[in-house]
Image: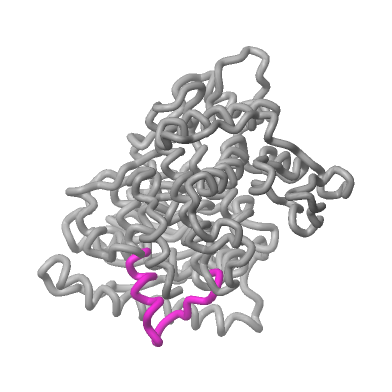
Amino acid sequence: MRGIPDASVRFRSVRTRAAFLVVVTVVVASLSASSLPASATAPRATQSGRAAYEHSIDEAIASVQAFWRREFPALYGEKYIPLGRVIAAAPGVAIPRCQGSKLSYKDTAGNAFYCFQDNFIVYDDARLFPQLAKGFGPFAIALVLAHEWGHAIQDRAGNAQQVTIGKELQADCFAGAWTSDQSGRSQGPDLEPGDLESSLAALLAFRDAPGTSPDDPLAHGSAFDRVNAFQEGFEAGAERCAAYFDEPPVVVELPFTSVQEEGSGGEVAAADVIPLTVDLLNDFYGQVEAAYTPLTIDSVGKFDSSDRSSIPDCGGSKLAVKQVRNRVFYCIDDDYLAFDEPFLQQIYDDIGDFGVASLIANPFATRVQVMQGESGVADNDLAIVLQADCYSGGFTAAFFNGYLQGGSLSPGDLDELIEAFLVYSRARGVRADVPITFLRMGYFRRGFFSGYSSCDLATIQDEVADL
């Protein structure tokens, strides 16, 4: 998040993550061990769990293959040609030539890829897939395979020569379409609670490094771009994905605009993030709500949840530690916003400035809902939670498009938002079986791409009634 230029502002360094790469003319998915949680760094699946691990791969392969037998003729009007082979690469395993290039395990370590023209998928069975299974669960393996199968579909549809970022986002979209189809079937991989959230975390790990230009021939998309493509496939199906080269999705990946910005990462100093965010939110809601009353920075307080005496009252009652620990909240009775300072400092240090801004934007939206007299705010109804995320999406779009005074999005900001959602998303009062992070991202995207006016509460209530 870029603020008003200030020579005294100090910036934290940018953390880079491994991205998809192109090697020997093959699209390759690369994930370093440092990109995974600490629990995911074991060298391979244990022997006792090997049978279950292999079964999950076999199930995923059979399910994706069956999906495309059904979908390909309907989308492209031609018979589906099944995938030739799926090869589990490991030291000593022979790998076929790809477009005439000889490959060894060294070329595939840490990767999974589809070989265009030669019709096979290779995945690293010694490190990458065991790490994915341990770090994100078996569904992450199925997600990677469904993505690589998307490249096989491009090969069959005559789209192998499209630009890399277009092919990668379409493959993510196809993976989302398969996931949605799979969620309603009794055969194939089970979609367990938490798997949709894991899909967001996996896509975040596979993102381009912040500052990558979408015109880079190796670009695969920011985490926000990849999540958007995956969720678009999940929501609209493979038909939408098939149209990606004629009607491409909006790509929001931002390149660095200067050497100075690349060095800084575009981060605003910690002390400036909340005042800047409050100013931007007041500017936005002042434009979209005629009767909006700005919230002053004096009405934004901080506390330390480890110090009981610092926790504020709300409506004449002392708030409990468990209510406010690691939280940002809006007090309806007293019209103030407050945050657990050590928690937001950790968000800033570990994620970045827009991670903090996104967590401020949500209770700010709650304040607007109260002003609008929306029902269910005090009870934190699911539809209210999702409408607030939709509002925040509208705010972020206005910020992205330059309609607000005092700042603009920086490379990686929207990825920081996804990280913050994953940390913070379990809202009080929402059932544990509801994929809340996945839903929240979907409604944020609605506000971002369709605008603040698309966030009608009655419509959202109808949509979530059957959850």
User: Which region is colored magenta?
Assistant: 175-194
The total number of labels drawn is 0
Most common secondary structure along the magenta stretch = loop
Residue 416 visible in the snapshot: no
Report x, y in % for residue 165.
33, 45
Tell which of 50 and 4 is nearer to you.
4
On the image, which quarter does residue 270 sit in?
A: top right
Q: Is residue 423 above or below residue 266?
A: below
Residue 465 relative to residue 430: left or right: left
Q: Position of residue 123 (x, y in %)?
A: 45, 65
Q: In this rendering, would 411 be left or right of 363? A: left
Residue 242's quadrant in the figure? bottom left
Location of residue 376 in the rendering, given as x and y in whole percent from the top left corner: 53, 60
Q: Residue at x 73, y 39 (%)?
A: 345
Locate residue 392 relative to residue 245 in the image: left or right.
Answer: right
- Magenta stretch encompasses residue 355: no
